[in-house]
Image (cartoon, rainbow, N blue to C red):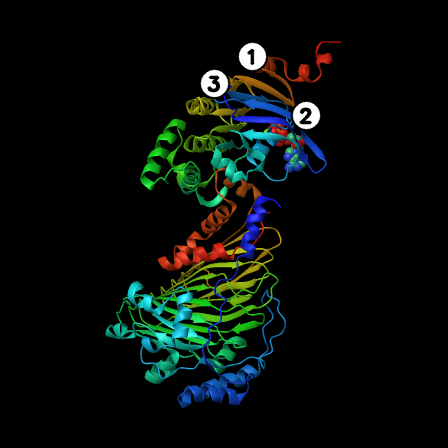
Amino acid sequence: MKQPLLEIKDLRAGVEDKAILKGINLTILPGEVHAVMGPNGSGKSTLASILAGREGYEITSGTVQFLGQDLLAMAPEERARAGVFLAFQYPVEIPGVNSTYFLKAALNEVRKHRGLPELDAIDFLQLVKEKMRLLELKEDLLKRPVNEGFSGGEKKRNEIFQMAVLEPALAILDETDSGLDIDALKIVAEGVNKLKRPDTGQLVITHYQRLLDYIIPDYVHVLHNGRIVRTGGKELALELEEKGYDWLIHPAAAAGV
Amino acid sequence: MSSATATIEEFVNKEYQYGFVTDVETDMIPPGLNEDVVRLISAKKKEPAFLLEWRLKAYRHWLTLTEPTWQQAHYPPIDYQAAIYYAAPKPKKTLGSLDEVDPEILKTFDKLGISLNEQKRLSGVAMDAVVDSVSVATTFSTELAKHGVIFCSFSEAVHKHPDLIEKYLGSVVPYTDNFFAALNSAVFSDGSFCYIPKGVRCPMELSTYFRINSANTGQFERTLIVAEEGAYVSYLEGCTAPMRDENQLHAAVVEIVALGRKSEVKYSTVQNWYPGDKNGKGGIYNFVTKRGKCLGESSKISWTQVETGSAITWKYPSVLLLGDNSIGEFYSVALTNNLQQADTGTKMVHVGKNTRSTIISKGISAGRGQNSYRGLVKIAKQATGARNFSQCDSLLVGDRCGAHTFPYIEVKNTSSQVEHEASTSKIGEDQIFYCNQRGISTQDAVSMIVNGFCKEVFRELPMEFAVEAQKLLGVSLEGSVG
Ligand SMILES: Nc1ncnc2c1ncn2[C@@H]1O[C@H](COP(=O)(O)OP(=O)(O)OP(=O)(O)O)[C@@H](O)[C@H]1O
Ligand SMILES: [Mg+2]
């Protein structure tokens, strides 16, 4: 068997006295796309945040291996350099920091980690142009400070654009589809698909089957109250779209007993 | 400890790197201040009678004043009798050229990264270095003289150009101006003088480096810059001091006279006096009066300052816009960290017609630092068509620091236009995490955000200074992100 890209075992975490994740098990092999769905507040973003290394969560048990490394022991920037990318549900604005400058700094950190030389301005611009075409992103966005004044959809598209430039091994997309219009959704999804390689994986958090029409998942997981309560193929998403979550959460009620 | 905090903690522990003491023999007078001390200072410097008279008048006036308390700064009372008012590095013999400067002092400048020899060879920046109030070396004077530019220590100017000194000394900042200006006028021991004749664009940037070396001394230097019609000069000032447990007073006066039509003076400061330790022990009290007077029509004075040091900064570089169409500018970055306090800003006084002023102030507060912007825009009745634009932005790093803005506007002419913009932002954990998630370390993220915040001001600095300023901000940031 191939070495898993990501292997989460019995992950339990929370804040202060509140448990949020209550024993997550999830393995992503290279080349796989996993979708995570689930009602609001079930812990999807928390899982994404913990994988990316956001502070403020207490991890009470479990392990996370990323390409055989202990992910939880790594600083957030080390995880990013090693190839964990999080497309944020709510990307923050960073006033005063030019987008191009920011992205160049990020890319050079990643390249340094991979033992590659820094890209010079010309090569960088070339790369950026190419990726912008992929996402059909307006060029003037890159001249502005990071996310500052970007529309909701532009912010989301910008996240995937950054992902395209950084070429991570594991991309975690947290509700990238929400806030995108139909056309943008297609463009972004196609972008994500083009970035798929046999050695990379994707963890796609979404509420809507719609996105999964474009990004075809190998597995769909349903997260509820901090646990994965059901795992299935892409048809599970269709079923959820039809029936909602209730039948999974209260199977008895759904059966009409 | 969380990793973001851990990195920030490393900033905290970054020591002030200029805190060494140079071992040179010093000619010091005993502590205390009275008329005899004023006479002694004047005598040591073999000054002409007019100057002694002026000092004495200033001293007597100072006695009638009480220390100001309106600024947003808190410090224990200063004992003016405990300070030493004259300390000069003892010269081995009279200085004729740079080669004769005490090698220990030259070593000091090497440590500061501003070797005079190097300056001389490479950068083409003419510079005057002032240690403990006395000018020790002026490079490039001869070359400047070819253009008719006078650039020398204040003492030298007193002897060589007494007429100019008598005419312009106190013409912008009279000794009656304020408590610290009066004190400076009475006891100042040296400083720099610069005169740019008509039509001359000074061929190089002029630079003064101030350093306080001895213990218990106050530094009271004066700078006087005069630009004739069509003259231009860019002037740089840098400052450092050793680390000492007690506070030291720096009360300088800078006067700029943009005399003639279209004369222009650009004055840039990177102030990095010792700020005191993490607990607020020691550090320089920087109480400085800086003012320029645009007398000529279409003349221009521009102040750019990066204030990262000092325990307390109290400073308002100002411009009096008298000539019609004259321009005043103030670009400022002030950073306070740990227990530092800064109360800084500017005064733009519009008297001439169609005078314009721009104020860009960027205050950064970290740790428990307190940062106040205090600005006055005054438009006189006769200042038809005057315009001002002010922008005051504050950036908070962590949540134990403070930013305060006190803009005062006085408009007596209805045809004038005054605009004021202000903003406060905070470096939040979310922003840092976003950067981290893209592979950028917390340290780099903070300096990226801070540099972005300051770029409108850095843009005004000469190249090498801008680089130094960026580095300084990186070193000086010791807040906690939250
Ligand atoms: N830092 C925090 N402090 C307190 N509670 C938190 C924190 N982070 C998450 N939670 C709580 O944990 C639960 C899971 O939140 P999370 O954001 O992971 O949900 P989600 O599945 O992403 O929801 P949505 O679909 O609405 O985005 C919520 O009840 C939320 O309020
Ligand atoms: Mg969420």
Question: Please, is residue A255 above or below residue B415 in the view?
Answer: above
* Label at residue B279: none
Secondary structure, mark 1, is helix
Rate crowding at label 1 as few (under 14), some (14 to 19) or many (20 or more) other CA atoms within 10 Å: some
N-term-proximal mark, 1 vs 2: 2
Q: Which residue is mark 1?
A: A235
Front of the two marks 2 and 3: 2
Residue B355 in view, yes or no = yes
Considering every residue shown, the one lying at the far front of the view is: A1
Considering every residue shown, the one lying at the far top of the view is: A256
User: In percent of the image, x 54 and y 64: which residue is there?
Assistant: B275
Q: Position of residue A131 (x, y in %)?
A: 38, 30
Front of the two marks 3 and 1: 1
Secondary structure, mark 3, is helix
Residue B410 in view, yes or no = no
Q: Quadrant of ligand 1?
A: top right
Taking depth in this image into account, of B386 and B79 the one nearest to the observer is B79
Residue type, label 3: Tyr
Q: Which residue is mark 2?
A: A225
Q: Quadrant of residue B262?
A: bottom left
N-term-proximal mark, 3 vs 1: 3
Cα separation, mark 1 vs mark 2, equals 22 Å
